Each structure stands twice: as structure tokens, then as C-alpha cells.
Amino acid sequence: MQFFSATWLKRYLLLILLGLVFTLPLGSCSLDAFRTASAKVSEYATSTLSDPKSFNYALSNEFPNIFIFTHAGLVDENGQTGELMPDLAESWEISEDKTHIIFTLREGLKWSDGQPLTADDVVFSFNDIYLNEKVPTPARDGLRIGEKGILPTVKKLSDRRIDVTTFEPFAPIVRQMSAPILPAHILRPTVEKTDENGNPIFLSTWGTDTDPKKIVVAGPYVMEEYVPSQRIVYRRNPYYWRKSPDGTAQPYVDRIVWQLVDSTDNQIIKFRSGDLDMVTRLSPQEFSLLKREEKRGDFTIYEGGPRSGTNFISFNLNPAKQPNGQPIVDPIKLRWFSNKTFRQAVAYAINRPKMLNNVFRGIGDLQHSPVSVQSPYYFSPQEGLKTYDYDPNKAKELLKSAGFKYNNNGQLLDDKGNPVRFTLITNAENKLRVEMSAQIKQDLSEIGMQVDFAPISFNSLIEKMDSTRDWDCLMLGFTGGVDPHSGSNLWTSRGSSHFFNQSPQPGQPPIKAWVAYPWEKEIDQLFLQGAREFDEAKRKAIYARYQEIVQDELPQIFLVTPKALSAIRNTISNVKYSGLDPREALWNLYELQVTSKAAA
């Protein structure tokens, strides 16, 4: 699953899981002690909630991830406006028939090991990795074109010029070229060589057991150290291309310490004690606590409008069977979950105003759409989008109309007398999500449903979503983006992140009898139409219809959009904070500067 600078915005599915916070405690040793060893080095500290799953971008489904710091694509997005801006490519030209894009690389680009970065690397990255069907990368979903999912072709014209060709007009193509460029001189042999099963050894290359100093990148930072469950240390890439207007090399900060912290509570403790310089994605509770300390703690709380992305619960709608013939979802539960009326009843039964006031302390907005509120493609309730106002009586009426009934104890039964009981999971590290789930358990009990709430680790949650498909109902969050096509890997029925009805995936044991629902097929067609259309007004109408279908069928029941909030030390300057970009305070990390603390 995956979304991204442009790269990170690409994936609703990048699984931010809205709890993966950048913040930063220093585990077993204090940050001040860590800094003492390098007092003359400018640095700041931030953090995340779990260890990375891979150092290989093509195989990564998580967000935040190391690639925020280390990688670069041909283009990027301005975090505050969402507009495309040049990155490794200094410019691009679109042909009159809109089927060719000619990218021109900057002159003198180099990899972090000093080797030249040329068109050969771009062609390798796309043709040999992202467009290679033998590589199970979520990056490929957003590059499929037309009914048959035909992939573009990428051709070298010269050392600095690349021709990207699509067989038909494909509006999202330039944004898709934000995928990081990877080093051909390092990785080509791993793609060409196969293991005993015929798979490229690339699939086992650059795992987290790799010496981080051997990861060659083109972004502003390289990895210097990785201590599992403690920290990742980044140092500035001396070969990074960016310079300030006066010619000063960027990034300005020599080193970043990305602390691996096991809970949001511990992140706040570390920040308050001075071990952290930045806590992003603050919860409302954390905001209320830190706001009182803003002046005394010499930090600023930044507010960036509605946060990019979505929070939701989702039911497992998969009708397929495992390789051993066992149904993926209990057939009794699948009859409930796959019933649109059942899902709509659940939506009416969730007291989202209460959630906004109690869990979010009023710092947010009710959420109704899979598209981020700040996106120009957002279709609002004022424009006609369906909403589900809290109404438990209506929920009960809907359930009765669908054949459900109540026993003398008020327990909900289906038409065959089976009690309605299922398990709700979320990632335990995210305190806010745990509180939201606890309320939903209570809300659904008011309409006779028994919900067994079982918080689990983030990695276990991802395993259930991506591999075993063994879950009933989950609470999750995905990152958002400017262009809805960035969520194609989540919303198209064959997408690698289409978790609520996951199709057979490359490299996994085959599942049997998988089918897409009719409304999923209609969404597939809308994404095809939206990708072909260059007229922005027509594209907006197409994606409005997609939002209408999602809000009617409710494969995801949307909850609350929080405000984007981060606490950042006043020693860090040039912050251009944004809720539009999932990277928030780090989208322009190459411009950040640090004023050394007296203690350092």
C-alpha cells in the first residue's frame, strides 16, 4: 500500500495509518548525550512509531518511511500548494497529442556515492523496476493506462533527456514520475539475476538488514546508522543537487536523528523533556497539553488546516477462498458485511459529532469523502455528497428492512438467528485510534451489535491486510493527495492496496473465486475516464461521481478529519508547514535550518 511527495501523495495507501507520527525520542540514551559527541554538527530530531519494513522503495507500502529523507524523483509537489515542481528533472514538455512527455535532467547530477546520475538510471528505474511485472511494487498501479492497464514506455533520448510515451492521453502521468529514481549501477545486477524460484534477487535486496551506508540515493540525506527499535541517523548528501539562491549547498542541516518510539505518549514525554525537536501529527489531546507550554518550552505549534488523508472503519468484503478452499471471510459474516444496508446502518449508528467533541476535542471536521478536503477535486456535502448524520433509530430501521431482528435482550440477530458479532482491530500504538475504536464499540452496542475490540501491533495489522486477509473490521487511515488518481492502488479493484476486497496479488499464494462487486467495476471505469481527461472541470465531475459511489456503498465509513498540527522547536527555521502534504513539516526539509542550542 502507498502516497507521496508527489511520490508520497501517490498512495492513500502508503499506509500512514494516521498514527505513524514523525516525532522523536532517543530511546535508551538521551538526545543531549547523543549530541555531545558531535557538538559542531547541526542536527534536529524527529520520530516515528515503528521500525521500517524495507530500505527498498519499490517494495515499501508504509508511510512515514525513510524515503522522505533519502530519495528523489523527476518531479515533486509543493507541499503548500500541491503544484508540480521540478526535482531531478529541470523541465518537461508535453506533446500536442498528449502522449509524449520529454523530461530533461539537470546537468551534473550525481548519486550519493559520487557516480553520475543519467537518463540510464531513469530508464532502469521505470522499465526494470516499476514497470516490471516480476517486481510486486505498488508504484505500478498508478501507471496502468486504459482498460487493459497498458504501461507506458520509457526511452532514453540522450544522457539528459527521456521520452515517456503513453498509448493514449493520460493526465496523471507527470505526477506519477515523482517515483524515486534508483541507481542502475548498483541495482541492475539484482534485477537480472534470479533466485532458485526464478524471482529477481532484487526482491530480497536492500532489506533492513543491509548496512545503511550501502544504500545509494539521490535525495537530500543518506542513511548513516540504523539501530533497530532505537533510531535511524541521516547525514546530508554531499552530492545533492539543490542550492539556495545565493549558491549555498542544501540541505543546510548536517544530520537528522529519526527516533523509533513505541507510542505517541512516549513521543510527547520525549518532546517535553527536550529530547525531541519536532512532534508532528499531534492529537487533539497532545495539542491541548503542549499549547499551554508553547512559550515556556520555546516551541511553536503549527496548524496546517485539515490533515491530508482519511480516517475510517472498513469491513472485509472479500468473497474469495484461500488456497486450501476455506473462505477468507466467515460466510455468515460476509452476508452481513457485503450488504450495503448493513454498512449504511453502521454509518448512521456511529456518533461522529461525539467523537469530534470528545476524542478530537473539537479540533477537526466530520469526514464524508475518500478525497482530502484540501484537494480541488473534493466533492462536498454542500455540492450534493451524501452524509450519515447520527441516527441510531434510522440504523435500526435499516437493519430490520434488511431482515435483521432483535431478541428480547435487544441483541441483533440476522434472518437465520445468528447473533451479529465481529472483531474490530486497529494499531495499538495509536492512542487516538484506540479511543475512536472504543467509542465505536459502544455506539454499535446501542443498536445490538457485539463488537470485540482487539488492538494489535502495526506490523500485525499490515500482515492481516496484505497477506493473510484474516480480519473482520478494521480502523485505519490513509494518506491523501491532490489528484484522486494517486489513490488508484487503493480504489481500483485490482490495486495492490484494495484491502477491503483484495484481489490475487503477485508473489502470494493464489486465492480462488475472487470477484469484484459491480460498484467496484464502476469505480474502475471512472478512474479510467479521469485519467484520460485533461479538462479539469470534466475531471472534477468524474471524480465527484466516484465519491458519490463510495459514500453510498461505504466500503469505508469515514469518521473525522483532524487538523494538521505539529510542535516544532523555535531553533528550527524555514518551516513551511502544510496539512495538504502528508510530509507536513518535512516536505521542504532541504530548506530547514537549525540554530544550535546553548547546551550543544
Image (cartoon, helix red, strand yellow):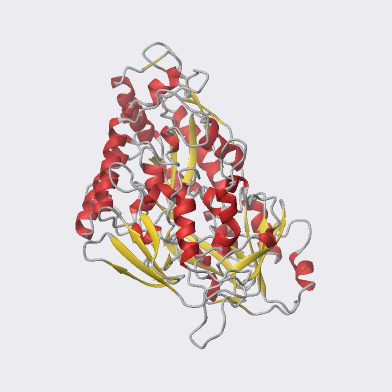
- Identify which residue, 366 or 369, lies in the foreground: 369
Q: Position of residue 510 (x, y in %)?
A: 48, 28
Q: Residue at x 55, y 67 (%)?
A: 219
Residue 163 to residue 59: above or below: below
Confirm whether residue 183 shows in the render. no
Q: Position of residue 66 (x, y in %)?
A: 59, 58
Q: Quadrant of residue 255?
A: bottom right
Confirm whether residue 494 shows in the render. yes
Rendered-image quadrant of the C terminus: bottom right
In the rendered image, the residue lying farthest to the top is: 416
Residue 94 to residue 250: above or below: above
Q: Residue at x 60, y 59 (%)?
A: 186
How many numbered markers are drawn? 0
In the picture, measured across the screen, residue 69 lies left or right of residue 543, that is right
- Identify which residue, 544 or 452, lies in the foreground: 544
Q: Position of residue 45 (x, y in %)?
A: 65, 66
Q: Quadrant of residue 34?
A: bottom right
- Identify which residue, 242 or 597, lies in the foreground: 242
Residue 556 to residue 399: above or below: below
In the picture, measured across the screen, residue 225 lies left or right of residue 347, that is right
Q: Position of residue 176 (x, y in %)?
A: 39, 57
In the rendered image, the residue lying farthest to the bottom is: 246
Q: Residue at x 41, y 70 (%)?
A: 158
